[in-house]
Amino acid sequence: MRVRVAACLAVLGWPVFLFAQTPPAPNSHPTYVELRALAPDAEALQVKDLVLQKDAATFTLTGAVHLLPAVNGRLTGAVFVGQGTMKYEPPIAAERNMLRHLTRGEPFEETFERAVFRFTDDTAAQIKAAATGTSAGSPGDAKDALKDTNQALRMQLKDNLHARILHDVLSPALGRLFHAYITGKKYSNRMAYMMDPQGAGFVAPEEVQLFSWASNREGIFAGHHYSSVYAKRERVPTTAGAWIDIQHQQLSTEIDQGGEVIGSASTTFIAALDGLSAVPLSLFPTLRVSGVTDESGTALPFIQEDKDEDADFWVVLPKPLAKGERVTIRTTYKGKDAVTAEGNDNFYPVARTNWYPNNTGIKDYATYDMTFTVHKRMRLVATGDFVDEKVEGDRYVSRWKTDYPLSVAGFNLGLFKRDEGTIGDYTVIALANTLSSNMITSLSRQLPIGSYDTASANRLALSESQLAMQIFSDYFGPISLKRVHITQQTACNYGQAWPGVIYIPTCYYWSPTIRHQLGIEQTEGGYWDSVASHEVAHLWWGHAVGWNSYRDQWMSEGFSHLSASLFLQAAYPKEPQRFRNFWKAMLEQITEKNSQGYRPNDVGPLTQGYRLNSGRTGSVTSSLIYPKGAYVLHMLRMMMWNRDTGDATFKELLRDFIATHRNRPVTTEDFQAVVEKHMLPEMNLDGNGRMNWFFRQYVYGTALPTYKLEHSVASTGGQTVLNLKITQSGVSDGFKMLLPLYVELTDGRIVRLGSATMIGNKTIEQQVPLGQIPIKRALLNYYYDVLGLEER
Ligand SMILES: [Zn+2]
């Protein structure tokens, strides 16, 4: 199906008279202009104890409501001045807990004297029906309140709400949007409660969120689906996107010596809702759109405000689409700063996922056909399969294409030295910059780092990546990509992965001695030895399978981190302590208090993802979703490990997971289902063939047990008997765990004895006859098999 569409596009081409007509100026759609300029009615409606029930929030208003004038016959807002309260109790426990971080433990009950409501639902009708009369109200206050909210949306939140409302005003479908901007008195004077069937901001595809942007209180303090979803126990399907599902992208991109991008994108998508009248696309704000056309070459109105303001890119369609209808639009754009020139033909692609018009906020798998043009002296590598390259005049042109969908497209460019190898079906190409970037040149003036030569590090990057590809193919099965580029990026201390293009941090290319001088030494978890393998692992975790929403992102980072531990275990067979040190470091990250006094594990579950960061709790996410996400998979690995078959069952589980969902986003529920398919009988602690006990405790929950082992070894008549006393504490009564037990033999070898099933806070005592095995001591949790603390 996708191949046919691509072929059609090639045949259609684009008419030469494309811009013979004058394209509409950005932001000039008359309805949009009208929405943007709305001011509240001078006259107000009087309300007394008016109750607006908006999902899990209850607003009670006594005072004056100034409606905003109708646009296209629709009322889209009201400003309230008076005495108001908002009570709110999210429908799920994890969200109630998160909200307590904002309210310091109290039930949420905010009071306010001003609020701006924006809506496309029936709020105006409710207000009118409840109004007890009209009055002069406080037109000045109402005007100021609206102005403040619009200013915050534009300059601070950088969210073009007017474009979002435009969609509903132009659509024949009924709108269901409701936003409340509240100047709260207790918790935050900059707070927004949002309901949007298309997904509420960051928490999309969830429809409800509460967030604050007041300083020291910023954060998303609640996010969830409509309460009815939980009441009915509905399973929310995996979606390609709330607005559109992009099928194919044909991208033509030119990058000049200064990093300026000149692009054109033909984007073929399917409408994901009935009455789709305008389409939001994610495009880096400095990439300024010069025009958008439909298949016939007709110019379409579009919205893109100033690059430093609410620059969201929206395209207004010529007519609303029905769900499932497919169209292609072509966008032309150009601008600086999406790719920055870092000196000596080193470039930094700043815009990671939106250097072309992309779907908003989610991983939308699409096929790509991309052509890139750079100066002939340079080389560019991109995601997907290499088609061809040529030099035309002083330009180097390369083409990259896939007939399988990719989660995202990316590239790297520069003047590279190249090392190449193969592993199985895969070609691995390592590319390091030939010359120093400005940052390295200036560092080398300040520090005695000697000459900067990336040659040996590039060979190391190649060999580590080859080994990683080999291990991960064995554990996780094949991926669609056949060619992987391991490339240097100018950022020092983090990497990133695209499908087939991996960015390795520039400081990887320095020797440990130089990194020592720079104060960026090896961590206990082995950062520099595992960063390449972590990024290679993203070819599976994040790309071969994506994530459906922020709730599922923990798997991408966590499983890539677990993969790094597999790499360390295989790459350094003579240094087994590296593996244990890695897990010890993971445990410390999860359980050591941050500067705000929070243990990351306590702030919230893995499924809150990046929302765990807030002004109250500090930066938590990276200390949680990487190490704890990894721990979840490590615990399963350890439970499934078998003396005779090793990781065989664990590999079957992961290969099945990838094969079942290949080139698609996955949910946490998808993962649990595959774990349940492969679980061993001893893991069936609930007796129902489900792994709810484990997911409830460690994925959706914040359980953290403490273990204590007391033991003695007795030897009578040449027979060894091990007396064990094991205590599990600090958990709820229903907490269950399979706790592995090891012994150290007198020759120093560590052998797994078996596991104890522990339920609740309790102590078990047991005598284990070991025959003639000479042992030195018993050990609990030797490989950090279970995420928990140890009491000595
Ligand atoms: Zn990562």
Image (cartoon, rainbow, N blue to C red):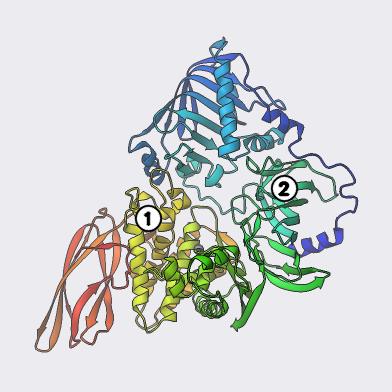
Residue 416 lies left or right of residue 295; in this view the side is left
Q: Which mark is residue 696?
A: 1
| Three-letter code, disc 1 | Arg
Task: Report the number of discs.
Answer: 2
Residue placed at 56% from the left, 76% from the top? Answer: 454
Q: Please give left or right for residue 4 compared with residue 413 in the image.
A: right
Residues 757 and 251: in front is: 251
Where 158 sits versus 735, above or below? Answer: above
| Image x and y of residue 344, in percent | 65, 67
Q: Residue at x 44, y 49 (%)?
A: 613
Q: Which mark is residue 687?
A: none
Task: Provide residue 331's location: percent of width, then percent of height.
Answer: 76, 51
Residue underneath mark 2: 288
Q: Indicate left or right for 245 with 138 as reference.
A: right
Cβ of mark 2 under 8 A from ligand 1: no
Instruction: Measure the alpha-carbon separation of dots 2 and 1.
Output: 46 Å
Residue at image point 43% right, 78% down: 648
Residue 464: image location, x then y, percent = 51, 78
Give the residue displayed 65% in from the left and 25% down from the top.
75
Task: Quadrant for residue 497, please give it.
Answer: bottom right
- In the rendered image, the quadrant that contains the C terminus is bottom left
SS for tag 2?
Answer: strand
| Nearest-to-viewer mark from 2 and 1 | 2
Q: Quadrant of residue 571?
A: bottom left
